[in-house]
Image (tube, helix red, strand yellow):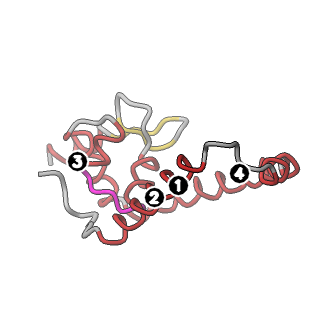
């Protein structure tokens, strides 16, 4: 019972939503990484959390899966609406940029970037990630 209280008090509701106490990191930030199949240790490192914080966040998500997933979907919907607004507003600018030829000398840089993106995608596809595995 005491550990449940500690886990609950390490997640608070703020104007940003469900947030890890003492940070500006929401559970929706953690959910983004979980959905992308990042292992908990890497999520912890990416978000600058300690073991207790990431374990509390993962435990809260697992315990309150339905509530957190519903709020996460709302966040995704809001983000999609905002992204669509700005894409429509800047459509002409994006088209102009896309039609511009690449700057000379950037071919190698673009090739490296594409290779990096491909490597990340292959890594995600081949990882044996399981969200219930906690940091050891």
Q: Is residue 43 magenta?
A: no
Q: Which of marks 4 and 2 is in front?
A: 2
Frontmost residue, 36 versus 49: 36
Could you tell whether 66 is left or right of 85 in the image? left
Q: Which of marks 3 and 2 is in front?
A: 2
Residue drawn at (44%, 55%) of the image: 116
Q: What element carries label 2?
A: helix
Q: Specify few, some or many for label 2: CA neighbours under 10 Å numbering under 14, 14-19, or 20 or more.
A: few
Frontmost residue, 88 versus 14: 88
Q: What element carries label 4?
A: helix
Could you tell whether 7 is left or right of 90 in the image? left
Q: Distance between the residues labelled 3 and 2?
A: 33 Å
- Location of mark 1 (residue): 111
Location of residue 66 by image quarter = bottom left
The image shows residue 115 at horizontal and vertical percentages of 45, 58
Circle 4/circle 2 CB separation < 8 Å = no
Circle 1/circle 2 CB separation < 8 Å = yes
Frontmost residue, 41 versus 124: 124
The boundaries of the magenta stretch are 36-41
- Location of mark 2 (residue): 115
- Location of mark 3 (residue): 55
The image shows residue 104 at horizontal and vertical percentages of 68, 43
């Amino acid at each position: 019972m005491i550990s449940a209280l500690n886990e609950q008090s390490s997640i608070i509701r703020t104007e940003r939503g469900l947030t890890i106490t003492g940070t500006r990191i929401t559970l929706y930030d953690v959910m983004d990484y979980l959905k992308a199949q990042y292992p908990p240790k890497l999520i912890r490192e990416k978000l600058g959390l300690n073991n207790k914080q990431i374990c509390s966040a993962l435990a809260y998500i697992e315990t309150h899966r339905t509530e957190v997933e519903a709020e996460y979907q709302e966040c995704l919907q809001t983000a999609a609406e905002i992204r669509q607004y700005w894409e429509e507003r800047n459509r002409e600018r994006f088209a102009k940029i896309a039609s511009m030829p690449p700057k000379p000398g950037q071919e190698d840089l673009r090739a490296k970037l594409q290779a990096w993106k491909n490597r990340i995608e292959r890594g995600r596809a081949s990882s044996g990630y399981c969200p219930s595995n906690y940091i050891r």
